Amino acid sequence: MSAQFNKALKHGFERHSTASAVVDGSQSRAERGFSLIEVMIAVTILAVGLMGLAALQSAALRSTHKSYMRTQAGFAAMEMAERMRVNKTGVDTQEYEGVSSPPAGTAPTSCLTNNCLSDDMAAHDAYVWLSALANSTDLLSARGAVTCLDAPCVIGSQYKITVMWDGRRNGATGTGCDPANTSDLLCHRITVLP
């Protein structure tokens, strides 16, 4: 058996040596390797695939950032809704009706350290909420508004809380909340019955 093995090994070695020594171009296609054109085509296909992957990653990052901003706007709207639920008397006397950015010039009496009446609490809530939106680092050019959905506003009326921000980062200032209008801020609205 070892004689047959040695013969096969010798035959393979001779064939390999002979094939390698051929220089006149009579090598078979399988023995020559890749041409430069084939390598360039493979590199081009790889480059196009990597560019597509980079574009996909960029789109995913933009989408994630938009979702993050919308979530932050939702948190801000819910914060005002909770403030209104705590101060039911202020809601019933329409103290929150018409709250909108920018915040009033000077800070009202702090209700964190002082006893406040419902109107003082509503003024404090509005100032704190609007100031937090104006100073937000997550929502560019953020604004807020609270409006009663009934005219006239009565006890038991629903309120619409709107948080607006420049999500397109194009310097938008419009408060129409029209997603098709690029000069309008992006908006997140919730309706509450405090």
Image (tube, rainbow, N blue to C red):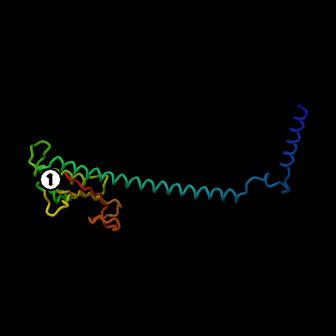
Between 69 and 189, the one lying in front of the other is: 189
Residue located at (26% from left, 64% from top): 175
Q: Is residue 125 left or right of residue 78?
A: left
Q: Quadrant of the rendered structure where residue 51 is?
A: bottom right
Residue located at (75% from left, 52% from top): 33
Give above or below for 192 relative to 8: below
Residue located at (18% from left, 48% from top): 85
Q: Position of residue 144 (x, y in %)?
A: 23, 57
Q: Is residue 108 left or right of residue 139?
A: left
Q: Position of residue 134 (x, y in %)?
A: 24, 55
Residue to which mark 1 is pinned: 91
Q: Is residue 124 left or right of residue 7?
A: left
Please tell me how many numbered marks the rendered image carries: 1
Q: Quadrant of the rendered structure where residue 102 is?
A: bottom left
Between 45 and 71, the one lying in front of the other is: 71
Between 81 and 36, the one lying in front of the other is: 81
Q: Position of residue 20 (x, y in %)?
A: 83, 48
Residue located at (30% from left, 60% from top): 187
Q: Residue furthest front?
A: 156
Quadrant for the N terminus, please: top right
Q: Secondary structure at mark 1?
A: helix
Task: Classify 10 Å Cα crowding around label 1: few (below 14), some (14-19), many (20 and above).
Answer: many
Q: Position of residue 77 (x, y in %)?
A: 26, 53
Type of the residue with mark 1 = Val
Q: Is residue 165 left or right of residue 109?
A: right
Between 21 and 66, the one lying in front of the other is: 66
